[in-house]
Image (cartoon, rainbow, N blue to C red):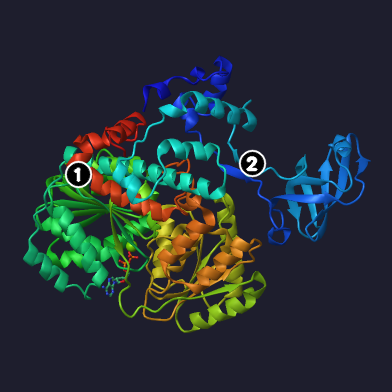
Amino acid sequence: MNEQLKQPVTAVKGIGNEMADTLADMQIRTVGDLLEYFPYRYEDFRLKDLAEVKHEERVTVEGKVHSEPSVVYYGRKKNRLTVRLLVGRYLIIANFFNQPYLKQKIAVGETITVTGKWDQHRQTITATQMAVGEQTTSQDFEPVYAVKGKMTVKTIRRLIKQAFSQFGHEITEILPNDLLQKYKLINRRDALRIMHFPSGSDEMKQARRRFVYEEFLLFQLKMQSLRKLEREQSPGISISYELDNLKAFITGLPFPLTGAQKRVVNEILGDMKSPYRMNRLLQGDVGSGKTVVAAIALYAAKSAGYQGALMVPTEILAEQHSQSLTQLLQPFGITVALLTSSVKGKRRREMLEQLKLGEIDVLIGTHALIQDEVDFQNLGLVITDEQHRFGVEQRRVLREKGESPDVLFMTATPIPRTLAITVFGEMDVSVIDEMPAGRKTIETYWAKHEMLERVLAFMEKELAKGRQAYVICPLIEESDKLDVQNAIDVHSTLSFYFKDRFKVGLMHGRLHSDEKDEVMKAFSDNEVQVLVSTTVVEVGVNVPNATVMLIYDAERFGLAQLHQLRGRVGRGSDQSYCILLADPKSEVGKERMKIMSETNDGFVLSEKDLELRGPGDFFGKKQSGLPEFKVADMVHDYRALETARNDATLLVQSEAFWQSEKYRLLREYLAETGALANEKLD
Ligand code: ADP
Ligand code: MG
């Protein structure tokens, strides 16, 4: 950045120390910060035809005063000035609250311009601004800035204006010419000026487009350079697996791989063989067959003399994975062990000893795997399932268990592409986008609570055929306790309902892990036909005989989670059903239920979920890792994001980007804004 722009804000006339402090609270410290403090929206003062204005929308209209305005006083110091206006062919009312003095300015037959909120039913504007005479065209758009503390929108506008007149000419372009030309982007100085002082919406859109691209490009350059750095600084191991044995293993599987499975297996094996450390995200919808892919990778590691680890978020899941991997790998002489917190005492000591000696090839477990006492002999591959449930820190500790093991993160939560390339921008991504053949789609229905009797009758029919059912209880936010109570209540209701005919089990997070295992085993062995549960069964659980998934208060769940829950059924050869019991009040809630009953495709759902909930809520608050953009919007500007990602990838790989004069300003800007990685994330 130009030296002039790096000066503290006090260099701008009219900004003293006190003002500088207020600005600092808004993260504005330098002149450059101030100039780049973008409006978050624009007030639109363009005149509109009232026929096109929606209810509750803000609007500016020009109208002729139809009759003498009147003021009504009510309450203490409260009053309302009412003006009847003829706007085009409409006779409307404009109400001004607590501004009785405006009456003097308004004369019958004159034209005034009024801005406010439009009430379509009452044909009334609740006005906040008024000007006598016709609209002046110079002020079509006014920028609105987020302000804090003592700062007002008016003041910040004035300060930015002053900053511009003093320093505007110092703003220099940072993007190389060819990119500007390629995308027909406005130069930086003009674009900044327009962002703050737009004269029309087209111009404003062009300026915005420039900064959207710039922001995404800078961000992606950061991610891509991080990735490059990772590769250079932490060379991984080259796992030279035995191809012939591996082929025999794959041929020996109980089913042929799907095309998508083959593709991701190749991507993963390529990473493993390369001297770089694998850092790959494997996405695949519930039931798409990720376990087998993991098994193949683990087999490959073992055939090259390395141990592998699989980390999962819950003990139940660890156990299931242990079963299915043992089944797949044991016949080939691979030793699989399960380490959870319930492995104790002597058995635990022995297991850890064997691990250290390399007698265990594949270790499966929960976070128990990353405790200090766990030492591998030669860890070459780490796989985590449902990685978004693990913190960044846990992922790092696990990775440091080996010399520099390859890491594969698996997730069944389809992450919309725009998020995948931002949140996981430094990773490679593989997607299994094809289901094994012959899978029946799960029929999903949305029912109101009043239909519960009919739903239960339907469930009973399935149970009578020898099938099983899950019943998921309301999710009550922030309250594990209430969740449990709900599950207990529903359990007693259903136990009574199915009394003497079917057994109803209960599962929730407050149970001891032994108890959970017991319940799960009883369900798995069909000793219990109906399993009432909180969302603890959400991930991974596999009981193919279960064909009904009933979800209470389904409107409380996000689409991604509903889809996960639904994925617990449809795992066998029988037709399965998912019933969403919900009385959503909001339109968004209804929309969600509709989408769920219309599609089985996790990726479609995740995109919709992102649209409905926005990126902030997508992963839940705790661990979003989402970058904040000033101008750009990941959801709406996703095309620009893709473009910037491709450009950044090419740039970072090119010698010129790191050397040539052409990119000097861009490099400098990146380094100054801390956007060019010289330390590792994660
Ligand atoms: P997820 O991706 O949800 O972890 P799993 O790995 O548990 O899915 O696979 C779901 C089911 O599909 C398992 O019973 C598995 O054996 C089966 N399966 C996986 N791949 C195939 C395939 N290519 N053809 C047929 N069945 C498959
Ligand atoms: Mg799985």
The x and y percentages for residue 568 are 42, 68
> In the image as oriented, which residue stretches furthest toward the top?
17
Q: Is residue 570 left or right of residue 95?
A: left
Which badge, 1 or 2, comes first in the chain's sequence? 2
The residue lying at 14 percent from left, 68 percent from top is: 249
Q: Which residue is mark 1?
A: 654
The residue lying at 67 percent from left, 72 percent from top is: 450
The residue lying at 58 percent from left, 62 percent from top is: 555
Which amino acid is tagged 1? Ser
Q: Quadrant of residue 441?
A: bottom left
The residue lying at 55 percent from left, 65 percent from top is: 592
Which element type, helix, strand or loop, lies under badge 1?
loop
Which element type, helix, strand or loop, lies under badge 2?
helix
Give the crowd class for mark 1: few <14, some 14-19, many >=20 residues within 10 Å.
few
Q: Is residue 503 above or below residue 236?
A: below
For marks 1 and 2, give the one nearer the viewer.
2
Q: CA distance from mark 1 to mark 2?
A: 46 Å
Residue 491 appears in the rendering = no
* Quadrant of the image where one finds ligand 2: bottom left
Contact between marks 1 and 2 (CB within 8 A): the answer is no
Between 56 and 521, the one nearer to me in the picture: 56
The x and y percentages for residue 7 are 43, 20
Give the crowd class for mark 2: few <14, some 14-19, many >=20 residues within 10 Å.
some
Q: Is residue 642 above or below residue 583?
A: above
Which amino acid is tagged 2? Gln
The x and y percentages for residue 228 are 22, 42
Q: Quadrant of residue 247?
A: bottom left
Q: Which residue is mark 2?
A: 139
